[in-house]
Structure formats: C-alpha cells, structure tokens
Image (cartoon, rainbow, N blue to C red):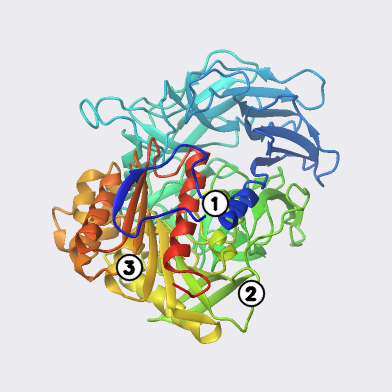
C-alpha cells in the first residue's frame, strides 16, 4: 500500500529507519537509486601517468590506483567498511595522500569516525602511513608544492562539519559567542609530526591555496562564526611561516564597482606568485561558486580587475596553466563547459572552449574542479548525467577531444526515468534554459501530469546528474510524470547580469520565467495543465511556498526546507549575512522588500495540498519557517502535512531520513496528483 499521508493537517516526527513507504513502485525506485557507486574524489598524477580515486565499495569508500587510461586498477589498502577520501598526489607522482577514518574512533562528525591524514608510496609495498592523530574536523587536503608538507583545513574538537548546511548544535549559552568553532589552515610534515596552524585564530578560513613555491597561502576568511560570515569574507595572503600578518587583497565592502559587497571564492596564485585570480560575484551559498574572473596583485595595494566582464557563462573554478592562461570550468546554459582563458596585458580575457558536456563534473574538491597534470594538458574528473552514473573521465585539453570515461563502476545501471531534453525559451528579454525529463515508458499518445522542481540557491543551476537516494526530481519521472527543472533568472549559466536579475524580486520575475517555461512545454508536449505539481528545496522550498500563493495552476506541492516569512526568517536563521546582497538592505531598514516576497502575507490565496519537510536543526532555513507555513495552511483548511527530521540540518546526513523524505514526496504527489489522471 502507498505511504499514508493524511488529507488533513498534522505534524509529525520522521519515523525510525525502515518505516518508510511500502508501495512497491516507490520501494523499487529507492532500491535502484541505492545501487549507484558514487566516487568521492579523483586525482591525476602530475606526470599524467596515473589516477587515484575513492569509490564506494560495500559499506565503505576505498582508494584505487590505476593507469591514466583506467587500466590496471587496484586497491591501495585492504580496509573494509570504513571511508578513505580526498586523494591528492605529491609532485613526485609517487606519494599519495588521503584522509581515512579506518583507524579513527567515535564520535566523529555526523555519526562517523575521526579522519586522519595518511601518505602512501604507490611504487612501494609498505602500507600507508598515518601521519596525524587529529581530534576534530579535517578537510581540503593538499600538498605543499615542494612535497615536504601537507595542508588542510582543521577545526580542533569540532562537533559538526564546518558548513552552514550541517545540523546546528544546541543554541544555548551566549549566542554568537559561546561554542564557536573556528576553522584554520593547518600543516603537517609529510613524514608526520606536530600539526601547526598557519592562520590567525580570529579568522575562520573557508578555502585556501598554496603559491607555486609553497612559501605563501591565499585564503578566503572572515571573523567567526563561520556559518554566518562567509558572505562578508575577505581574500587574504600570508607567508606559511606565520612571521607576517595577513595582507588583505580584497575586501568587497570597500569597493565601489560591480564587486562591491559581493562574494569571493577559489583564489589561485599565478605561477610567478605576482597575482591572484579568483571568482567574484553574487553567490547565495558557500560551495555553490559562480561569478566573473578577477585578478588582483598578490601583495595587495590595488583593486581587483574583472577580466571577464559581460560574458554569458558562469565560471565556477579556475587554475593557472601558464603565466597568461587559465583553465576554467563554467556553467554554460544548463551544461558544463571547460575553457581556456587567455589573459592579455590589459583588457578582457579571451575564451576558447575546450569541451562542453551535458553532465555534472568535478574532482571532489570544489564545485566543478578538475585535477590537472603539471602541464595542464590533461584533466581528470568525475561526471554523471541523467543517463549515465558516476564515472571517472579523462580529457586531453591539448587536442580538445571529447572526454572519455575510463571506469565502468555504474555501466550496468539503467535509468528508471525517461529521457532528458534541454528546453530554452525567452521571457521578458531573458534567454532561459531548463531540463525536462520525460515520464518513464513514455507514450506520445497519452497526456501526463508534470511536476516543476525548482533548484536551491538561488545562485545555482540544474545540471544533468545521476540522482542519489534522497530528495530529488528524477525519481518523480519514474512514477510517470514529466519533470521540469528550470534555471530561471537568478541562476548560473547565463552571465552575472542574469544571476543578479532577481535581486529584490524573489518569487516574481523568476516565477514568471518558470511559468513561461511551463507554457512552452505544454505547447509541444502532451502535458495536462490540470495536473501540474510544484516542489523544491531551500530556495526551491521558498519558491514552492510562495508559488502556491501566487497561482492556482499547481494542484499538489512539496516544500523542502522552505522560507514562508522573510521578516521572521531574518531573526531566526544563523546566516543572515547572505540576505543584504540580495534584498539590498536589512529587514529593519527596508521591511517592505521582505514583506512582498513572504508567502505568509498571501496565505489566504492557497488551495494547493502541500507537504512540508525540514530538518530539526537546519541553520539555513530553520524549522520554525516550515511550522509557520504549515500552521497557516492548517488554519485555512488546506490539506497539508509537516514532517520534521530529528537531528538533521539543511542537508540530511542519515540515509534513513534521505530515503524517507523521498518516499514521502513520491507518495504525496501520487496521492494528490496521480500520474494516471484519476482522483
């Protein structure tokens, strides 16, 4: 039988593991999604001859080493049921560093065990050596270029991941003062020894990079608390010796141009150490990187220069490939593109496309990052699409040949959902793109319901990706729906002006873009307008809550981690620094701009049955927002249900909860928007 979701209003705690949907269709979808082997990270050796990757194996994640074409793959260790992550080659292309919890004790982070740094000689027979005895959260492992030391981000005695998406701790004591956890750049000799922190204790570091000579680091940092202050972080540089104070290279609050009060990410030293390139633009989430490419002197003293003004793509990651060239990963429409940007002495950079892929890609370190060889002629990365599960790919950047998959981890998987189609349309002067999944077992003679799934952010984009077990759009196609995933104004992929086009306009222009896309699809596809659904998570959860107050076109909705009332939200969340760049002022200085986008102010207009789901300890979109929306729907007699997942943050950590939230969403649409068209 289908998971029962009451037609009336009720709130409940998520069930224990195993008490999810028993509908055989939903159970089969969950089972199929659980079969995918994910790849945590991949690294190409500097000499371009070998690959290392960390891949899901049984109940753990294991490291394998292979030739650059994927052949002769073999396990690096004989560990079982533990996690080996974050592979990184030394400059000698022989030593491999990684993180492992195989010897770690509990408690670790998010029900895991403690990670430590290991180094292996891939040409020898000795087992990998554990070189740290850490107690805290560790990430972003990287070799110092001389191969004598390793850097990483470290939070001593951490109780959670250093991320706003992680579940918050108990909000007790003096808020914003007590229980603050600070992340710093740390370093340890490659042979082991004492761990040394490099950056000041008064700065929370979000990311860093070594200079080519290993003598300096550039990093993005802000005063703690780290969850809240990434949006006002500055770009710094300092020596690794710690003998000099950090030099502020970029403080966007002091600028007067288009970068003023915006965000910075992915700093990288030029080969000669004289300049730092970075991504700068309007960003809504740490880790969801996009903007223009900027360059600033590495010693400070001058304002940064935008070398890509007016481009119609969104760079997300970069690396220097010479004194005057960058390799850049960028979002182009709804696809991934890797380009070469030539930097002239003056003026704008010139881009040459190396390859386009209708896939999501990355090497596991940053959004869309690539693992390059020392000459920047080859690149390795993990890629997936709606049609293809996760595989390691290698691209020859010198020849511009299409990247080739060199693994077959998921070759046996076949999608349970329908084919994918890129949809483009024009609305109010904007070129807009989105992805449409056809229903499974599509019959052009039938008419189908369609569910619109809006991404989070808003500064993000839907790219083709194989789904995992958890909340997502693709599984809805397996139940027999069209699924439309738009990239409306505010999204990455069409240039910085498009990203900023929804500032002070949440839920209006972007929703008009979405509805215009629905109209275009209905003209060319057998979609029944009387069977439209709406869903989304985070910003998509807000758009779902707000959308059902603005139109009666949607007949069922699922709002995940949404925002119902921007005015109360401003005082409830732990990341309020992100709001002023988008709304133009604080809620106390301009309450009207927040009020006009608050679903709660239009709640009398809602008729749509809406399932509301949220994590109990969500810092980004706190549970009280979901309670407020659910309570208002209940007062109006609108069919609704609220499910709060214990111990979860903005991104769910427990697999049982990830399965349950997807099962509930599938069951809700099946109840109120049946694919068969019967009620």
Residue 577: percent from left, percent from top: 28, 47
The residue most toward the front is: 1
Residue at the spot of label 3: 608
660 or 37: nearer the viewer: 660
Labels 3 and 2 touching (C-beta < 8 A)? no
Q: Residue at x 33, y 30 (%)?
A: 169
Quarter of the rendering containing residue 607: bottom left
177 shown above or below 493: above
144 or 476: nearer the viewer: 476
Q: Element type at marker 3?
A: loop
Q: Element type at marker 1?
A: strand
Residue at the spot of label 2: 442
Q: Residue at x 74, y 25 (%)?
A: 77
The residue most toward the bottom is: 523
648 or 507: nearer the viewer: 648
Cα distance between the residues tagged 3 and 2: 27 Å
Q: In this image, 103 relative to 510: left or right?
A: right
Residue 573: percent from left, percent from top: 27, 44
Q: In the picture, which quadrant includes the C terminus?
A: bottom left
Q: Note whether residue 276 is visible.
A: no
Q: Residue at x 42, y 27 (%)?
A: 199
The mark nearer the N terminus, 3 or 1, is 1
Q: Which mark is residue 317?
A: 1
Residue 84: percent from left, percent from top: 64, 30
The mark nearer the N terminus, 1 or 2, is 1
The mark nearer the N terminus, 3 or 2, is 2
């Amino acid at each position: 039988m289908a998971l029962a979701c009451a037609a009336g209003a009720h709130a409940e705690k998520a069930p224990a593991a195993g008490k999810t949907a028993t509908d055989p269709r939903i159970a089969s979808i969950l089972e199929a999604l659980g079969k995918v082997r994910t790849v945590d990270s991949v690294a190409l050796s500097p000499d371009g001859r070998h690959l290392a990757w960390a891949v899901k194996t049984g109940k753990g994640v294991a490291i394998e080493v292979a030739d650059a074409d994927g052949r002769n793959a073999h396990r690096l260790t004989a560990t079982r049921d533990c996690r080996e992550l974050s592979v990184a080659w030394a400059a000698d292309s022989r030593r491999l560093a990684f993180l492992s919890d195989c010897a770690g004790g509990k408690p670790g982070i998010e029900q895991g065990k403690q990670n430590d740094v290991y180094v292996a000689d891939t040409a020898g027979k000795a087992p990998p050596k554990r070189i740290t005895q850490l107690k805290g959260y560790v990430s972003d492992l990287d070799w110092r270029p001389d191969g004598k030391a390793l850097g990483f981000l470290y939070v001593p005695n951490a109780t959670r991941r250093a991320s706003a998406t992680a579940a918050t701790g108990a909000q007790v004591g003096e808020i914003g003062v007590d229980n603050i956890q600070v992340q710093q750049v740390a370093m340890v000799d490659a042979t082991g020894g004492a761990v040394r922190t490099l950056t000041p204790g008064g700065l929370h570091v979000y990311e860093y990079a070594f200079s080519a000579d290993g003598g300096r680091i550039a990093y993005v940092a802000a005063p703690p608390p780290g969850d809240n202050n990434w949006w006002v972080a500055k770009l710094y540089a300092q020596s690794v010796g710690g003998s000099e104070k950090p030099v502020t290279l970029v403080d966007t609050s002091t600028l007067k141009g288009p970068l003023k009060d915006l965000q910075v990410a992915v700093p990288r030293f030029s080969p000669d150490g004289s300049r730092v390139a970075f991504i700068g633009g309007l960003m809504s989430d740490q880790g969801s990187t996009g903007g223009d490419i900027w360059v600033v002197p590495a010693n400070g003293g001058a304002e940064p220069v935008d070398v890509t003004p007016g481009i119609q793509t969104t760079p997300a990651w970069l690396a220097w490939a010479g004194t005057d060239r960058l390799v850049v990963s960028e979002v182009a429409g709804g696809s991934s593109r890797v380009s070469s940007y030539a930097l002239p002495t003056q003026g704008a950079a010139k881009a040459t496309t190396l390859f386009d892929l209708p896939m999501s890609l990355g090497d596991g370190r940053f959004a869309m990052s690539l693992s390059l060889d020392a000459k920047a002629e080859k690149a390795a990365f993990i890629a997936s699409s709606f049609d293809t599960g996760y595989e390691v790919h290698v691209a020859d950047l010198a020849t511009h040949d299409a990247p080739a998959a060199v693994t077959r981890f998921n070759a046996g998987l076949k999608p349970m959902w329908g084919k994918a189609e890129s949809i483009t349309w024009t609305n109010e002067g904007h070129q807009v793109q989105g992805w449409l999944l056809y229903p499974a077992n599509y019959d052009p003679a039938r008419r189908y319901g369609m569910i619109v799934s809006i991404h989070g952010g808003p500064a993000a984009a839907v790219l083709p990706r194989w789904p995992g077990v958890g909340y997502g759009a693709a599984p809805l196609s397996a139940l027999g729906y069209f699924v439309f995933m738009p990239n409306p104004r505010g999204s990455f992929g069409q240039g910085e002006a498009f990203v900023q086009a929804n500032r002070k306009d949440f839920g209006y222009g972007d929703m008009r873009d979405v509805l215009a896309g629905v109209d275009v699809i209905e003209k060319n596809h057998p979609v029944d307008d009387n069977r439209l659904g709406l869903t989304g998570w985070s910003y998509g959860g807000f758009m779902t809550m707000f959308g059902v107050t603005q139109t009666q076109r949607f007949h069922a909705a699922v709002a995940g981690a949404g925002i119902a009332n921007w005015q109360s939200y401003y005082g409830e969340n732990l990341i309020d620094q992100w709001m002023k760049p988008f709304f133009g002022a604080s809620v106390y200085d301009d309450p009207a701009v927040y009020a006009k986008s608050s679903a709660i102010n239009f709640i009398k207009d809602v008729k749509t049955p809406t399932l509301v789901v949220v994590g109990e300890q969500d810092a980004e979109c706190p549970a009280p927002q979901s309670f407020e929306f659910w309570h208002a729907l209940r007062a109006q007699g609108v069919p609704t249900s609220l499910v709060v997942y214990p111990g979860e943050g903005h991104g769910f950590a427990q697999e049982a909860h990830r399965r349950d939230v997807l099962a509930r969403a599938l069951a809700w649409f099946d109840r109120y928007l049946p694919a068969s068209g019967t009620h």
